[in-house]
Amino acid sequence: DLVNNLLISERGNNVEFIDVSDIRNPVLAAELHVDGFRNVWASDASEDRLYIGCEEDHNGYWLDIFDISDLDNIEHIERIDFREKIYRISVEEELCFCRCDGEIVYFRTDDPERLYSWDPRQSNRYFDLFQVGHLAYIKTRLSSGFKDLTKVDFSDVESPEVVQIVYD
């Protein structure tokens, strides 16, 4: 992920912030070692927030939120428990999406305690997720074996609307 000329990369239980403003000379700007768990599975960042999906030896999953406005003083803001592993996080504008095994969990970034879930049909697995503003593009494999790309409008977080489905 690239935010403010910083490449953000997760490895094990570390998150690295690499300054790529000079692409020929990337520099490690900061490193965050997150104690208390074994793996960081996914991450994404906004202007001043880092969202990471974590797992502790198969004993639990959660989303940790950090204030990264000052890389010399990264602060933990909140931890949210999840039922499933988070494979992908996408944050843009005021929405954060987390792709888990059986559902998409999402929330407004100004109210991370209020989680919403989206799974309009029975799919075997979510493959990918990306967003542009309030629109999310979700690639799934249906129980019938077909794949699809679903475009969903999340302008109304309580009632997302499927805008388009393209079958593969």
Image (cartoon, helix red, strand yellow):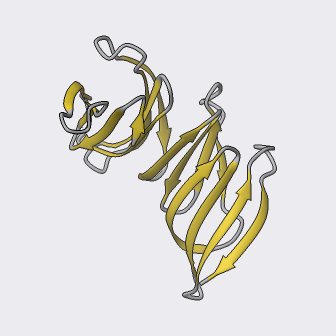
Coordinates of residue 149 in the picture (x, y in percent): 62, 71
The answer to whether residue 106 is left or right of residue 14 is: right
Evaluate whether residue 52 shows in this view.
Answer: no
Q: Is residue 78 above or below residue 150?
A: above
Q: Nearer the viewer, residue 133 or 88?
A: 133
Q: Residue at x 28, y 12 (%)?
A: 72
Residue depicted at 31% across the width and 11% down the height: 73
Q: Foreground residue, 141 or 83?
A: 141
Task: Decide: is 70 above or below 111.
Answer: above
Quarter of the image for the N terminus: give it.
top left
Question: Would you identify the image quadrant in which residue 91 lies?
Answer: top right
User: Eyeballing the image, is 78 above or below 80?
Assistant: above
Relative to 20, residue 122 above or below: below
Using the image as rendered, state which of residue 117 and residue 98 is in the foreground.
98
x and y percentages locating residue 162 in the rendered image: 77, 63
The quadrant in which residue 71 appears is: top left
Provide residue 163's location: percent of width, then percent of height.
Answer: 78, 63
The number of numbered discs placed on residues in the rendered structure image is 0
- Name the quadrant containing residue 168: bottom right
Percent position (x, y) of residue 66? Answer: 42, 23
Q: Answer yes or no: is residue 76 visible.
A: yes
